[in-house]
Amino acid sequence: MAGIVEELSPRAFCERWPEEHPDRVQLLDVRAPEELALVSLPRAAHIPMMELPARLNELDPTRPVVVMCHSGQRSRHVAAFLLANGFEQVYNLSGGIDAWSAEIDPGLPRY
């Protein structure tokens, strides 16, 4: 049985994994390409939600994964999927990129 998805705010993410240590965590953006064209984070890998099952091998199951989307709903489902598929350190970025813009970088466009 998969574990419960732990929520992590954008601020908590930045405190836990500062930008100067990007290799310590995998930030996974599961939004659609058209959403990514509006706004994205340079440190995030992009695998659209619907492509993830076929591209699971692109993620390292031994490193923490923080999953993000626009608001945190889709990413919560993806995080549960990762937990069910052998990933042990999985977090949902609560509020998604919208919360990131509000809490971390107000210069990011919101949609």
Image (tube, rainbow, N blue to C red):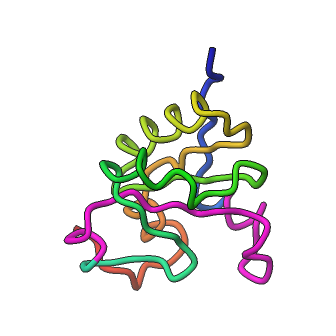
Residue 44: percent from the left, percent from the top? 53, 72
Q: Nearer the viewer, residue 72 or 87?
A: 87
Q: Nearer the viewer, residue 13 or 58?
A: 58
Q: In the visual, does 73 lie left or right of 76?
A: left
Quadrant occupied by the N terminus = top right
Q: In the visual, does 16 lie left or right of 70?
A: right
What residue do we see at 52% from left, 52% from top? 67
Residue 79: percent from the left, percent from the top? 52, 40
Q: In the visual, does 35 lie left or right of 80?
A: left
Vertical relation: 34 (above or below) 66: below
- Start-end of magenta stretch: 13-36
What residue do we see at 30% from left, 48% from top? 50
Res 111 → quadrant: bottom left
Residue 91: percent from the left, percent from the top? 62, 44
Residue 72: percent from the left, percent from the top? 41, 46
What residue do we see at 80% from left, 77% from top? 21
What residue do we see at 48% from left, 77% from top? 41
Res 19 → quadrant: bottom right
Vertical relation: 4 (above or below) 60: above
